[in-house]
Amino acid sequence: GAKPVPERWATLSRWVGGQRDMYHRMDDPTKPFFKVRSDGKKAHKELQPHRVRALEKLGFVWSVQDEAWKTNIRDLLRYKKEHGHVNIPAKCKP
């Protein structure tokens, strides 16, 4: 079965998700990102440009879906080079 994720990685995972959320909200001001402070008030959070640059310098992936799409397109191009077509069988053996 699946092993439980250590808390430090679970915390990092939540932080990474928050960075992605803030990044995607930068282009859509109708979707502000709020964090509820300890006093119960909402604090607007935004991702500062220097933080975007720091994450991008590390190779941060802003959209997991876009990254998967790019990987699959590269694989499809490789498949076409090798087989001459992109008609991949529905059930393909590894």
Image: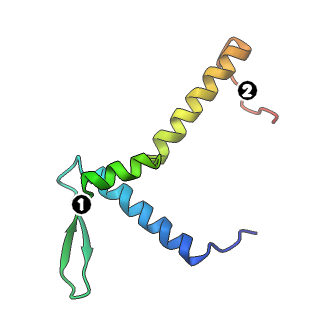
Amino acid type shown at disc 2: Pro
Q: Nearer the viewer, residue 86 or 81?
A: 81
Q: Quadrant of residue 90?
A: top right
Q: Residues within 10 Å of mark 2 (few under 14, many from 20)?
A: few
Q: Secondary structure at mark 1?
A: loop
Which residue is pictured at 17% across the width and 52% down the height?
29
Residue 12 in the figure: left or right of residue 80: left
Q: Which residue is mark 2?
A: 89
* Pointers 2 and 1 in contact (C-beta within 8 Å): no
Which residue is pictured at 63% across the width and 28% down the height?
75
Q: Which residue is mark 1?
A: 46
Q: CA distance from mark 2 to mark 1?
A: 45 Å
Q: Position of residue 30 (x, y in %)?
A: 17, 54
Q: Residues within 10 Å of mark 1 (few under 14, many from 20)?
A: some
Colouring used for the render: rainbow
Q: Is residue 66 above or below residue 25?
A: above
Q: Secondary structure at mark 2?
A: loop
Q: Is residue 48 above or below residue 75?
A: below
Q: Position of residue 57 (x, y in %)?
A: 42, 46
Mark nearer the viewer, 2 or 1: 1
Which residue is pictured at 24% across the width and 51% down the height?
26
Q: Position of residue 37 (x, y in %)?
A: 24, 81
Which residue is pictured at 49% across the width and 73% down the height?
11
Q: Nearer the viewer, residue 12 or 76?
A: 12
Quadrant in which the C terminus is drawn: top right
Amino acid type shown at disc 1: Glu
Q: Quadrant of residue 48?
A: bottom left
**Which residue is at the far top?**
84
Q: Position of residue 40 (x, y in %)?
A: 21, 85
Residue 21 in the figure: left or right of residue 16: left
The numbered mark, 2 or 1, whose residue comes first in the sequence reads 1
Residue 63 in the figure: left or right of residue 44: right
